[in-house]
Image (spheres, rainbow, N blue to C red):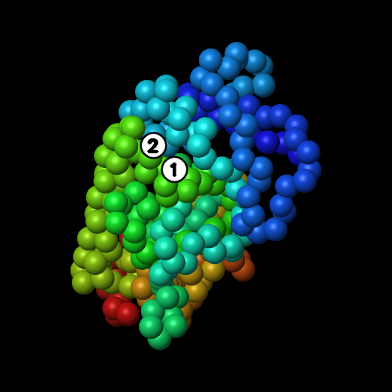
Amino acid sequence: MIEKNYDPGGKQVERAVDSDVESQSGESFRPHDRFSSSHPATPTYHLDPVLHNARFLHGLSDAGRSAVLQSAQHRRYRRNSIVVEQGDSADRLFLLLRGSARYFFITPEGRKVNLFWLVPGDIFGGACLLSDPAPFIVSTEVTTESEVLVWERDTIRAIARRYPRLLERGLSIACDYLVWYLATHLSLICHSARERLAHVLVSLARGIGHSHRKGVALDITNEQLANTANVTPFTASRTLSQWQRDGSILKSRGRVVLRHPERLFRSASQIAPKN
């Protein structure tokens, strides 16, 4: 088995470890061995673009980045695992290393509402940075096999006191959520169901899509698209079928391939009943 460590510049080193780690969904690997920023560079190091570009770590000194990364634990989650649940105590902070994830909320009636999608480099569980204990407002699930770095609340708060820029980064990310909320709210009152669906498809394809020989592929179901765009499953299915007929997308079970996003938006802007 391979264990991964990271240096202050976001470089990753792999080394063999014993195989006595937990393999069940959500169970953690053995915590990383600690090492200093003066660890000699070897050919096994390579730049990890996720850590190098992670917004939460921007602006930290080498010493600060080293302190943050060394205090994290590495965990792997199976597809469709729920990492945190709304209402639970916000006692951990996560940084998504590999895979994809999303926030969702369960209404009092039991309806699952999909919210913000997360890509490698994003954090979740930021409420644990607050001085007063707080619950997770929403749940977070991984949608593919995923890897995360995890900090316990006391640990990340202690580090944030030493490196206040972490709190600034967290506040900046929280402001982005407000922007997302505003855009979503305005789309509900200003855009048709077709326009919302087109916007969701293109936005998700840019964020978590992957290259396909006929366009950009997005692994998502009709129900997930309907929940994210706040339209009915019937509207989502009908609209996707129309877009497939005109060649804007290719649709198969659990997957959409975007071929011509510009054609999709032109079709979506045509007058259609709101849902």
Determine the residue positioned at 67% across, 21% down.
Answer: 44
Graded by Cα atoms within 10 Å as few (under 14), some (14 to 19) or many (20 or more), the crowding at tag 2 reads some
Q: 68 above or below 144? A: above
Residue 226 location (% of width, % of height): 43, 73
Determine the residue positioned at 33% across, 32% down.
Answer: 163
Judge by depth and name the residue closer to the eye, 26 or 104.
Answer: 26
Determine whether the residue tagged by mark 1 lies in a helix, strand or loop. Answer: helix
Circle count:
2
**In this picture, residue 236 sits left or right of residue 39:** left
Residue 51 location (% of width, % of height): 48, 34
How far is the residue under mark 2 from the one under mark 1?
A: 6 Å
Q: Do labels 2 and 1 touch, CB within 8 Å?
A: yes
Give the quadrant of the N terminus: top right
Graded by Cα atoms within 10 Å as few (under 14), some (14 to 19) or many (20 or more), the crowding at tag 1 reads some
Residue 125 location (% of width, % of height): 41, 54
Q: Which mark is residue 159?
A: 2
Determine the residue positioned at 52% across, 52% down.
Answer: 100
Res. 131 in view: yes
- Amino acid marked by disc 1: Thr
Determine the residue positioned at 42% across, 75% down.
Answer: 106
Q: 58 above or below 209? A: above
Judge by depth and name the residue closer to the eye, 34 or 109.
Answer: 34
**In this picture, residue 149 sits left or right of residue 127:** right
Residue 6 found in image quarter: top right
Residue that mark 1 sits on: 155
Give the quadrant of the C terminus: bottom left
Residue at the bottom extreme?
109
- Amino acid marked by disc 2: Ile
**In this picture, residue 181 sits left or right of residue 16:** left
Res. 180 in view: no
